[in-house]
Image (spheres, rainbow, N blue to C red):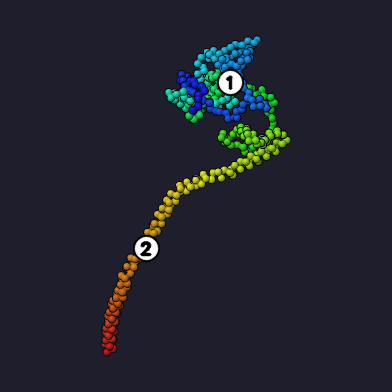
């Protein structure tokens, strides 16, 4: 667990929030000791009384301000703290401002602020969430280690982040920088090519992609010398681009940036293959019920056809059973036909008899007339 480097109270209006301050960053550079050249003798710094030449303990050292003429005003820490009683334990918020209004040049160092205790958790959360919802930062001041700091406090997830800032008179005027070009008329082709280069190198901000390679090289150098090996030197810094070569250099830069990006794009699928395979399996698993459902639906659609076929089969069986009856009917049909034939024969015979009788009667009449 990190140890707090400052404890105090944030106050805004009449609300007071006890907090503890922790360093939010840490250096990772290689730590060196000093030695006398050509020897292994350590060089050490001592606090020495320049008049007596004797070493002085840190607890016996006080501060003094030069007022001129070889005169000094001596001040101890209690006197310095008495100038602003309570300021070393109080962080007063003066205003809330939009985060976009703060120029990053004023930021100095980042710290995390945690609640001063369980009893202050509610007021801590109130200040944090209110600033997060408003998108604003709290501007305040505090005294720490004998110096007053301008601070900006902002919400970052569940924690409050305090950034110490430079005061306005501590930021140098840009006009102090010499030989800065003013407005220069640039060629449209140059601006267009520079814009293409910016576009080809544009990406998302991913802090984990960047590393202190110089420290890595220093560590490699230490290991190489420890093993008696030699480390190859890095490439020298590039020479300044000439005005006459500007367009050609821009063109080559765009091509190289585009090729690097396409190279990363080509490598990306190989790394993502397992994920894609897993995704394909998941997709197949998700689609499986759909296929099953589709099969069920297809079976449901085919069911009527099977039912019709069954009906046809049943009809054929029924027809087969009824076939003898039809045969019997067919056998009966001749009988009906015979009966019909006999009736017709009888009718024909009766008609013939009537015809014969009629002929005989006509013959008799004709005989009588003749007589």
Residue sitting at x 28%, y 86%: 363
For this rendering, which residue is in front, 42 or 142? Answer: 42
The quarter holding residue 37 reads top right
Q: Residues within 10 Å of mark 1 (few under 14, many from 20)?
A: few
Q: Is residue 83 visible?
A: no
Label 2 secondary element: helix
Mark found first going from the N terminus, 2 or 1: 1
Q: Vertical placement of 177 versus 349: above or below?
A: above
Marks 2/1: CA distance?
99 Å
Residue sitting at x 55%, y 23%: 164
> In the image as oriented, which residue stretches furthest toward the bottom?
371
For this rendering, which residue is in front, 16 or 31? Answer: 31
Label 1 secondary element: loop
| Marks 2 and 1 close (CB-CB < 8 Å) | no
Q: Position of residue 66 (x, y in %)?
A: 62, 13
Q: Position of residue 171 (x, y in %)?
A: 61, 22
Q: Residues within 10 Å of mark 2 (few under 14, many from 20)?
A: few
Residue sitting at x 59%, y 42%: 264
Q: Which mark is residue 167?
A: 1
Q: Vertical placement of 204 versus 331: above or below?
A: above
The quarter holding residue 54 reads top right
Q: Quadrant of the C terminus?
A: bottom left
Residue that label 2 marks = 312
Q: Position of residue 25 (x, y in %)?
A: 55, 28
Q: Position of residue 208 (x, y in %)?
A: 56, 35
The quarter holding residue 211 reads top right
């Amino acid at each position: 667990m990190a140890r707090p480097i400052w404890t105090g109270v944030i106050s805004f209006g009449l609300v007071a929030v006890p907090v503890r301050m922790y360093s939010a960053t840490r250096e990772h550079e290689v730590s060196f000791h000093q030695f006398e050249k050509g020897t292994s003798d350590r060089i050490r710094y001592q606090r020495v009384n320049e008049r007596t030449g004797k070493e002085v303990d840190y607890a016996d050292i006080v501060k003094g301000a030069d007022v001129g003429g070889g005169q000094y005003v001596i001040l101890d820490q209690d006197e310095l703290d008495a100038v602003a009683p309570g300021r070393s334990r109080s962080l007063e918020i003066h205003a809330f401002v939009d985060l976009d209004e703060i120029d990053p040049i004023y930021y100095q160092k980042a710290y995390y602020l945690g609640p001063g205790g369980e009893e202050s958790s509610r007021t801590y959360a109130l200040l944090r969430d209110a600033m997060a919802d408003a998108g604003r930062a709290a501007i305040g001041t505090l005294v720490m280690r004998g110096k007053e700091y301008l601070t900006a406090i902002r919400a970052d997830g569940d924690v409050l982040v305090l950034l110490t800032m430079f005061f306005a008179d501590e930021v140098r005027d840009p006009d102090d920088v010499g030989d800065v070009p003013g407005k220069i008329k640039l060629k449209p082709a140059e601006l267009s090519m520079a814009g293409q280069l910016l576009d080809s190198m544009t990406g998302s901000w991913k802090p984990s992609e960047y590393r202190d390679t110089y420290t890595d090289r220093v560590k490699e150098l230490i290991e190489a010398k420890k093993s008696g090996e030699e480390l190859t030197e890095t490439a020298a810094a590039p020479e300044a681009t000439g005005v006459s070569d500007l367009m050609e250099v821009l063109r080559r830069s765009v091509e190289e940036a585009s090729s690097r990006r396409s190279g990363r794009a080509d490598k990306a699928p190989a790394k993502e293959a397992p994920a894609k395979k897993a995704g394909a399996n998941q997709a197949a698993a998700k689609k499986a019920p759909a296929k099953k459902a589709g099969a069920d639906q297809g079976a449901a659609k085919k069911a009527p056809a099977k039912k019709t076929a069954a009906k046809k089969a049943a009809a054929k069986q029924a027809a087969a059973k009824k076939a003898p009856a039809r045969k019997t009917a067919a056998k009966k049909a001749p009988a009906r036909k015979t009966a019909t034939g006999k009736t017709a024969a009888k009718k024909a015979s009766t008609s013939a008899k009537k015809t014969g009788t009629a002929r005989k009667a006509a013959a008799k009449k004709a005989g009588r007339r003749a007589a």
